[in-house]
């Protein structure tokens, strides 16, 4: 399997995040990619290729122009006001029922276009955002040209980002941008299987009223875990999208047996949908030791997860999302890829 990567993600580093009752260094940091790449090579994966530039037009097919302009301008505006030390984050968030149109203040933009304090900006954030898109679209193009599968080894992740909101480490929804690009280039329908521990609220929101993208997510119950307000089983789509959103929320402490049952349900729905391409939002924060997770999957379980996805026998684009146990992140991610390869 070809693995697409970029070094441009490295500048997105040095910020902090609020973790409930304390400010800590970002869990989403450059070492994640290093650990995954090293483990992939150890397991015999050698087809690493560099991302190619794709421009902003595919991004604008999913995200609003004002939001994309904010992502590009946020750090320069912040730096002009506060200097280059530290990082940019919102002081407050927009209030329901009030005008959500930002003015020229960077504070108003952060309030309007972010929904939590886990999307800080530093000097290299915009370049990293662009690199994640380029990595994903390069991998998508490989699948479109006939590759059985390709892995977009990108950061920052994307599945919490919606058309005009960033949050949860996510700025641009890489999987959604890839899905739309594949549709624009001739695919009739796409399935997205989200196996990150957290519900992909951004992806759901983007495609919730559409029938050309099936979204299936296995995640922690919103009663227990971020993003708290979405991810219920009752959310099945709306309008033309009714029946094309499948949420499979699971309780804290879930182990591979119950997880496997949910994966089988999602797989059956995807198989019935028969997409032209399957996109996997690949998160391994379902691991028992993950600092932001609450499931109990073990490292060998990810081999079986990869094999199960491979049995769908579909052209598959795997896009990196979460996973923050640095010590085991590499082997867990590589096990999914190896399991898929051997499946």
Image (cartoon, helix red, strand yellow):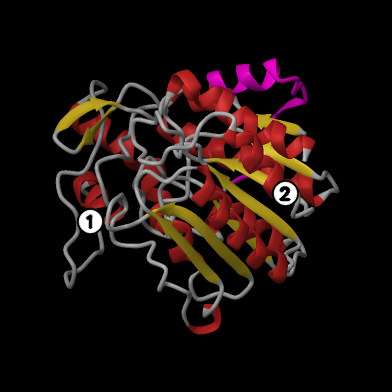
Q: As displayed, is residue 130 above or below residue 202? A: above
| Residue occupying the point 21% across, 48% down | 105
Could you say which quadrant of the image residue 35 lies in? top right
Residue 175 spot, x, y in % from top left: 57, 51
Q: Is residue 174 left or right of residue 187?
A: left
Residue 124 spot, x, y in % from top left: 42, 27
So how many labels did they put on this image? 2
Residue closest to the eye, 230 or 141: 230
- Report the residue marked by disc 2: 316
Task: Report if residue 163 lies within the magenta region.
Answer: no
Q: As displayed, is residue 266 above or below residue 25? A: below
| Residue occupying the point 39% across, 57% down | 66
Could you classify mark 2 by the number of other residues whose Cα lies within 10 Å: few (under 14), some (14-19), or many (20 or more)? many
Residue 225 spot, x, y in % from top left: 30, 50
Residue closest to the eye, 324 or 29: 324
The residue most toward the front is 257
Q: Secondary structure at mark 1?
A: loop
- Report the residue marked by disc 1: 103
């Amino acid at each position: 399997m070809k693995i697409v990567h970029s070094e441009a993600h490295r500048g997105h580093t040095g910020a902090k995040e609020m973790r409930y009752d304390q400010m800590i260094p970002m869990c989403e940091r450059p070492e994640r990619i290093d650990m995954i790449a090293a483990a992939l090579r150890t397991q015999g994966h050698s087809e690493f290729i560099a991302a190619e530039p794709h421009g902003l037009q595919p991004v604008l097919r999913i995200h609003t122009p004002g939001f994309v302009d904010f992502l590009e301008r946020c750090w320069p505006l912040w730096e002009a006001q506060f200097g280059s030390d530290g990082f940019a984050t919102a002081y407050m968030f927009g209030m329901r029922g009030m005008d959500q149109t930002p003015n020229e203040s960077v504070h108003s933009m952060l309030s309007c276009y972010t929904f939590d304090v886990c999307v800080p900006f530093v000097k290299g954030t915009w370049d990293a955002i662009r690199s994640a898109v380029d990595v994903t679209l390069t991998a998508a193009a490989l699948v479109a040209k006939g590759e059985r599968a390709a892995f977009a080894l990108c950061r920052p992740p994307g599945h919490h980002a919606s058309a005009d909101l960033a949050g949860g480490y996510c700025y641009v929804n890489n999987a959604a941008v890839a899905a739309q690009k594949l549709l624009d280039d001739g695919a009739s329908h796409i399935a997205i299987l989200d196996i990150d521990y957290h519900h992909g609220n951004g992806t759901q929101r983007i495609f919730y009223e559409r029938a050309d993208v099936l979204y299936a997510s296995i995640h922690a119950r919103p009663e227990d875990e971020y993003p708290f307000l979405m991810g219920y089983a009752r959310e099945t789509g709306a309008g033309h999208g009714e029946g094309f959103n499948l949420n499979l929320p699971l309780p804290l402490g879930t182990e591979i047996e119950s997880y496997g049952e949910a994966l089988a349900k999602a797989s059956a729905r995807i198989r019935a949908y028969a997409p032209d391409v399957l996109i996997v939002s690949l998160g391994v924060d379902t691991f028992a030791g993950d600092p932001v997770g609450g499931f109990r999957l073990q490292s060998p379980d990810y081999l079986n997860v990869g094999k199960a996805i491979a049995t769908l026998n579909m052209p598959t684009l795997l896009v990196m999302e979460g996973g923050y146990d640095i010590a085991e992140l590499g082997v867990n991610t590589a096990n999914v890829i190896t399991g898929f390869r051997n499946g």
